[in-house]
Amino acid sequence: MKSNLISKSETEDLLKQVSAQWKIEIPKAKNLKMHRIMDNVQIFTANDIMILKIEETYFPFLSQTSLLEKFPHVLVDMGAVKFMCNGANVMRPGIRSHSEFDREQVVCVIEESQHKFLAVGKSLVPSSELETMEKGEVIKNMHYISDKYWEIGKTITN
């Protein structure tokens, strides 16, 4: 893994991109550090910010609870937990409740008993279609507890 600081102007541009993609205001940071995990995967860190970039999509890192709370979410039953923690996508039968979201939007996955964040993914369908769906994939799981990004994230220091 290679790590390097990015310039102030690149930091500003990146945070603007992230804010626009997430439709959430991101706190300003002086300099972000980029940790290249693979060619198409990076983790950006600064102060209390951790952002995962997979290809062209930015995802909040699962350790960022206060940030995750600002995103749309689905609440899954306990039967879905072990599958989610092994990288499975969120299927319609496992969803107990949800907030509103659009297709291709970043969505957080929460388990129903402790209300902990399990995963972050990208919606495959808008939430408006969930009421009429009985089966099928709803969220593509992109980052989950105990995945390789989670493990690498625990070793990163600013």
Image (tube, rainbow, N blue to C red):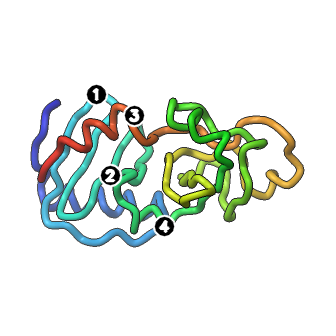
The residue most toward the front is 113
Q: On the image, numbered disc 2 is attached to which residue?
A: 51
Assign a secondary structure to mark 2.
strand
Q: Which residue is mark 3?
A: 147
Spatial separation of the CA atoms under disc 4 and disc 2: 15 Å
Give the class, few, some or many, for how many residues have Cα within 10 Å of label 1's Cα (few <14, many ≥20): few
Q: Nearer the viewer, residue 25 or 94?
A: 94
Answer few, some or many: residues within 10 Å of disc 4's Cα (few below 14, many 20 plus, some between 14 and 19): few
Left or right, residue 144 beside residue 31: right
Question: Which mark is first along the chain, 1 or 4?
Answer: 1
Where residue 19 sits in the image (x, y, percent)?
40, 64
Q: Which numbered disc, 3 or 1, marks the residue that appears first in the sequence?
A: 1
Task: Kindly tell me whether residue 107 is visible in this rendering.
Answer: no
Disc 4/disc 3 C-alpha distance (Å): 20 Å
Q: Which residue is mark 4?
A: 69
**Secondary structure of the residue carrying numbered label 1:** strand
What residue is at 13 percent from the left and 49 percent from the top? 157
Frontmost of labels 3 and 1 is: 3
User: How far separated are the C-alphas under marks 4 and 1?
Assistant: 28 Å
- The percent position of residue 113, horizontal first and vertical second, equals 60, 57
Residue at 66% over, 59% down? 101
Using residue 87 as the reference point, say whether residue 41 is left or right of it.
Answer: left
